[in-house]
Image (cartoon, helix red, strand yellow):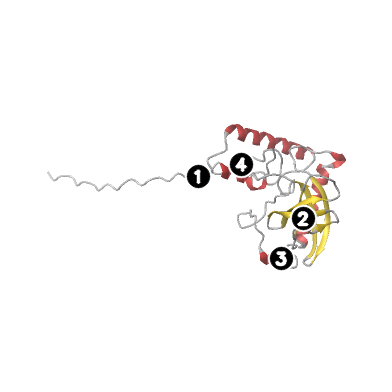
Amino acid sequence: MPKPRRKNRRPAAKCKKKPQKPARARSASRSYSYSRSGSYSESEGSSDGHSDEDDPRDYKRGGYHPVMPYQLYNARYRVLSKLGAGAFSTVWLCADEKVVSGPLVAMKVCKSKKSVAEQAQDEVMLFEQMQQNGRSSPFVVKMTDHFWHTGPNGRHKCMTFEVMGENLLALVKYYDYNGIPLPLCRRLSRHTLKGLEYIHACGVIHTDVGSPANDRLDR
């Protein structure tokens, strides 16, 4: 009786541990998205939807305004440094020279393209709706001012907001994509839901809750 052939065994392949997907909890205390409901750090940018860099090629007619440190905007806001950028705007840290020893603000300067300007106007309208009669929520970022600025690339809508911290994606990266600790995750979720409850009560629907790059943290 012929002996059965011995099968050659291949060495077992080592399985690489895949990083966990970023948790979809919203901001630690305030809704901070630019998806038509509230904040200054936009859900815009590169092909994946998020970027902190502005494309130099977009500094043209219909594009970004060339903001420079120490410039004064609306006879009030002194530019200190750059905070970030998205596909439709840049964001700058500014001092409000009309308020002595007042808090710094984040100034968003939108592109001058017509469609972007119209979107910015819609955004202002929604913020004004959420802040009617002086009302606000500690879980939703607050717009403090808005105005137009004309420059070499056209007419740009500008908005100012209270300054926030890092976005939720930075927190996910801090924990090396291994998941946010459960107590913190619960806190993020609770504050997110409170923010959503407020904007819904104002008649506003958030359209991009699930993106951690949109949401800002505040202590």
Q: Whole-percent x and y of residue 38?
A: 74, 46
Tell me the quadrant of the picture where the C terminus can be found: top right
Q: Nearer the viewer, residue 152 or 70?
A: 70
The Cα–Cα distance between marks 2 and 1, rounded to whole angstroms, is: 39 Å
Looking at marks 2 and 1 on the same chain, the residue that comes earlier in the sequence is marked by 1
Residue 169: mark in rendering: none
- In this rendering, the answer to whether 189 lies above or below 64 is above
- Residue on which disc 1 sits: 19
- Residue on which disc 3 sits: 59
Looking at marks 3 and 2 on the same chain, the residue that comes earlier in the sequence is marked by 3
The Cα–Cα distance between marks 3 and 1, rounded to whole angstroms, is: 37 Å
The Cα–Cα distance between marks 3 and 4, rounded to whole angstroms, is: 34 Å
Find the residue positioned furthest to the front.
101
Q: Amino acid at mark 3?
A: Tyr
Q: Dot 2, crowdedness within 10 Å: few (<14), some or many (≥20)?
A: many
The Cα–Cα distance between marks 3 and 2, rounded to whole angstroms, is: 18 Å
Looking at marks 3 and 1 on the same chain, the residue that comes earlier in the sequence is marked by 1
Secondary structure of the residue carrying tag 1 is loop
Q: Amino acid at mark 1?
A: Pro
- Residue on which disc 4 sits: 24
Tell me the quadrant of the picture where the N terminus can be found: top left
Q: Dot 4, crowdedness within 10 Å: few (<14), some or many (≥20)?
A: some
